[in-house]
Image (cartoon, grey):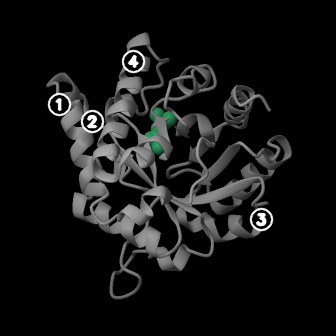
Amino acid sequence: MISPRKTYIIANWKMNFTPGESSLYLQRLSNRIQPSRNVQVILAPSTVSLQPLSLQINRRQFKLAAQNFYWRDYGAFTGETSVSQIRGFVDYAIVGHSERRHIFNESEEDIAQKVAAALRNNITPILCIGETAMEREDGETAAAIYSQLANGLNEVSDRDIDRIIIAYEPVWAISTNKNACPAGITDIEEAQALIRKHISKLYGKEASETIPVLYGGSVNSDTAGGYLSIKGIDGLLVGSASLIADSFCAIVETAKGIKNE
Ligand code: 13P
């Protein structure tokens, strides 16, 4: 079960860093980020770096997350990596990232199966959801959020909902490298409320109050504090700013400051 109201800071390195570079970068972060009770720092390197980093990390300091995997446990699936092959290396797995949905045409069915496969292998899924710019302009944000939640959680029972993290990543806000505008804060506050409302309908009030909801999309060290202060936001999924030690460490420090550590 996920401890309620922890703050999660997740570095999604995407398709960056070789295993050697990942190892050196981890070393730099290790020297600067101290273990914390309230702020969980999670690193999501490329699949090829998971095994070496799992031998190198101090798990009190960092946890590892997979960026992707295939949901079958084994078999004739050339080029794929199953979640059971990486289960010894990671505690978390990102599922349904918008780049997987939109660039690799991952279906809602695949995403639901991946969430189920992660849970089956004792890995916490970080289910990413978020509307596109067009859905937003058409006033379909709530519908998009609801349908991605309902589909992604299709295989999740009442018993397992407390093992899930939701990341709200509006597609229009990813990789913009712009600072947040005030409307962004309102959008995010409304979105987390929609997410919790829908979780309440599907799994009850308690689940809706305890499920961690993170924000992701162009977070940097200047904007992290603002996002973390939004009611109902329990952490951040950071892309490009997580590739720069100064920026990422500053984001983690900001989270600790908000938690009064
Ligand atoms: P950026 O922080 O680069 O916008 O990426 C966000 C993201 O996709 C994290 O998963």
Evaluate if marks 1 and 2 touch, with contact meaning CB atoms under 8 Å apart: yes
Q: Between label 3 and label 1, give the one nearer the viewer.
A: 1
Which residue is label 2 attached to? 131
The residue pinned by badge 4 equals: 186
Q: Which residue is mark 1?
A: 140
Q: Nearer the viewer, mark 2 or mark 3?
A: 2
Label number found at residue 56? 3
Disc 3 residue: CB within 8 Å of ligand 1: no
Q: Quadrant of the N terminus?
A: bottom right
The amino acid type found where label 3 is placed reads Gln
Marks 3/1: CA–CA distance? 44 Å
Vertical relation: 186 (above or below) 23: above
Query: Of the residues under marks 1 and 2, which one precedes in the sequence?
Result: 2
| Spatial CA span between label 1 and label 4 | 16 Å
How busy is the neighbourhood of tag 3: few (under 14 within 10 Å), some, or many (20 plus)? few
Looking at numbered disc 1 in the image, what kind of residue is underneath it?
Answer: Glu
Queried on whether the Cβ of the residue with tag 1 lies below 8 angstroms from ligand 1, the answer reads no
SS assignment at label 4: helix
